[in-house]
Image (spheres, rainbow, N blue to C red):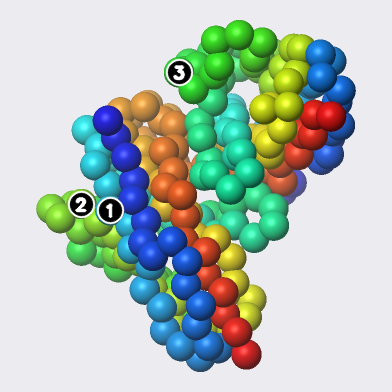
Amino acid sequence: NAGVMQNPRHLVRRRGQEARLRCSPMKGHSHVYWYRQLPEEGLKFMVYLQKENIIDESGMPKERFSAEFPKEGPSILRIQQVVRGDSAAYFCASSPIQTGITYEQYFGPGTRLTVT
Amino acid sequence: EDKVVQSPLSLVVHEGDTVTLNCSYEVTNFRSLLWYKQEKKAPTFLFMLTSSGIEKKSGRLSSILDKKELFSILNITATQTGDSAIYLCAFTGTASKLTFGTGTRLQVTL
């Protein structure tokens, strides 16, 4: 059973370019979460999605960042017009959560974004 | 505001020692507390705790939750160099998202 998959593992972008990060959840999981880890800081929640729905985007910066989880294909975190402050590790996690029950989240290997 | 505080921030021990890592939290509508181990990659799930006083064990690692005093501890006995990592504590409340502490950096030396 493959774990959470993320690609690319490393991404270098120049200031002003767009970054697209992809996440495929574990088999059987239909809930995806994105977290960001800035250098020397803890993991911070960004967004929680189910297929075709954004459930909670309270941690997303209001500009330049967007996320989707289409009916077919991976979840995508998109960062437009990247700036140096976007350099971080972006982790995706998935869970088979059901209403009223909490499940642990399993993390992917992360995408390390470097903005030059 | 919901928050998690972990202590100590960092710790250096000798192989074979026993360590206790602490996690205290303040959250409305608590659901669960989770422990993760992070080396130079993705956080790896260790434990999820939802009930007070019930110890969870996995090999040399164990954890327990106190919902009255709002804290959890992670114990590692007979530490090995492979235990060197950052140990993260997180909780879920009404929302499903995880709120993480800044972690405890553990280094196990020979």
Instruction: Please name whichever residue, A107 or B39, is drawn nearer the observer in this view of the structure.
Output: B39
Q: Is residue A55 left or right of residue A52?
A: left
Q: Are marks 1 and 2 in contact (CB under 8 Å)?
A: yes
How many numbered marks does the figure carry? Answer: 3
Q: Looking at the picture, which amino acid does disc 3 mark?
A: Ser
Q: Looking at the picture, which amino acid does disc 2 mark?
A: Leu
Residue at the spot of label 2: B70
Q: Position of residue A87 (x, y in %)?
A: 72, 32
Q: CA distance from mark 3 to mark 1?
A: 23 Å
Chain at numbered mark 1: B
Q: Position of residue B54 (x, y in %)?
A: 25, 64
Callout 1 and callout 2 share a chain? yes
Q: Is residue A76 above or below residue B12?
A: above
Q: Residue A7, can we see it?
A: no
Checking the image for residue A58, the label placed there is: 3
Chain at numbered mark 2: B
Secondary element at tag 1: strand
Q: Looking at the picture, which amino acid does disc 1 mark?
A: Ser
Q: Earlier in the sequence, mark 1 or mark 2?
A: 1
- Looking at the rendered image, the quarter that the C terminus of chain B falls into is bottom right
Residue at the spot of label 1: B24
Callout 2 and callout 3 share a chain? no
